[in-house]
Amino acid sequence: AAESTAISTKSPLGRSFSANVNTLKKVSKNGSSSDRKTITFAMRHRALRTASILFPQEVLDMIIKEEGYFNVTEDAASRCTLSLCAFGSFLAMEIEAMGLSLPHSDLVRLSTMHFPSYARALWRHHGRSDCRGFKGRLLLLLLDLCIKDGKVADKSLMNSIITEMANYELPRTLLSACERIAAVDRLESLMSNDEDIEAIMVIMKKAAHSIYSETRRHISTDSNPIHFMIVLRRFGKVVEKLGSCDYAQDQLSNFVDLLCILAHDSASIQKEWIHGMLDIATGVANCIRCRESRLQIFKKITKIDGGRDLLETKFAISNTLDYHVEITGRDGGKSSNDMVKRVEDSFALDMLSLITELKTSSTC
């Protein structure tokens, strides 16, 4: 029974995968297969992605081991993994698409080379050129080579890349770059000196204004602006993450200001989209640590049509302070839950006092 259920190259799945991979391996030195059809790295990358979707990970690992696909050299095979191979095929596909030269034609060697060194070589030869119209694509690839698995391998080069990005109007590239930076482990380590802080603040500000400008230009004429809402929400998450660092707190207020202007100037679109912008703005504003600054931001939100209702609904503000006074009046919480609860209730008090103040002023 064990033999009949074992997954190997003898199984239908194994034979299918082996057939596909063997087709890709039948490539002569000039890059053509026996039927003279060129097999590009883009085709290899798509084949690998398809296989990773169709087959479980353990199947792929077993077939690769049985067929010896990574056994080009003992050293390379010992360091190569399917994950590295996937990134190597992606790298080769991108370089091939931009018409640049690859250091190797072998996928295993590509996957196990020192990526930061290759990134520096690409930066030295192509980093400040227009790269045949692939400027944003190249800079983003260079950033991918610098940041791997949540760690920055070359911070100096990363700063140079994002500083160069900030010189161009590339909203999607800037957004993707900010997402990659926000995904780095221990963000504080990226801002260890003034140069690091300046580079990251510049690209955050540039990304915010580029996204704002493009959205403002097109959202009123687009019948379905959900694409812009997705972009704004993605950048909102980035700002929240990077805003956790002390040096980036100002960027939170800056982005919320832009969202409020955008919502105010987009009165012609459906109210649900304006509501979405204000919802993003509220989420970002929650991360502002300074109480006074946070209240000022919420006041701006309430001045936009639907803003006050959104805040009342989002935070479920009650009409009485009794419960909040009872909780926040206690001395010294006995547990972490009490501490968190006091913070939440303090925030609710801020919201309640703000809305009460606005209601009072509106009736005067």
Image (cartoon, rainbow, N blue to C red):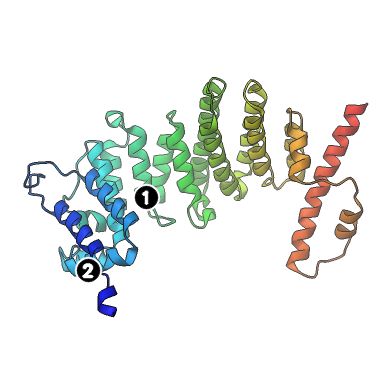
Judge whether residue 37 can be spotted in this image: yes
Q: Circle 2 sits on which residue?
A: 65
Q: Secondary structure at mark 1?
A: helix
Decide which of 264, 124 is in the foreground and name it: 264
Q: Is residue 278 left or right of residue 140?
A: right
Judge whether residue 206 can be spotted in this image: no
Label 1, residues with CA under 10 Å away: few <14, some 14-19, many ≥20: many
* Residue drawn at x 26%, y 65% as measured from the top left: 79
Q: Secondary structure at mark 2?
A: helix
Residue 76: which quarter of the image? bottom left
In the rendered structure, which amino acid carries the disc numbered 2?
Lys
- Mark 1 or mark 2, which has the lower sequence index? 2
Decide which of 128, 321 is in the foreground and name it: 321
Residue 81: which quarter of the image? bottom left
Report the quarter where the C terminus lies: top right
Q: Is residue 193 above or below residue 299?
A: below
Residue 150 % position (x, y): 44, 56
Q: Circle 1 sits on which residue?
A: 146
Residue 277 % position (x, y): 63, 34
Residue 297 % position (x, y): 72, 36
In the rendered structure, which amino acid carries the disc numbered 1?
Cys
Decide which of 21, 346 is in the foreground and name it: 21
* Residue drawn at x 32%, y 56% as measured from the top left: 54
Label 1 to label 2, Cα distance in Å?
30 Å
Q: Is residue 54 left or right of residue 102?
A: right
* Residue drawn at x 49%, y 57% as measured from the top left: 185
Nearest-to-viewer mark from 1 and 2? 2
Q: Is residue 157 left or right of residue 98?
A: right
Decide which of 114, 276 is in the foreground and name it: 276
Label 2, residues with CA under 10 Å away: few <14, some 14-19, many ≥20: few
Q: Is residue 174 left or right of residue 14?
A: right
- Disc ID at residue 5: none
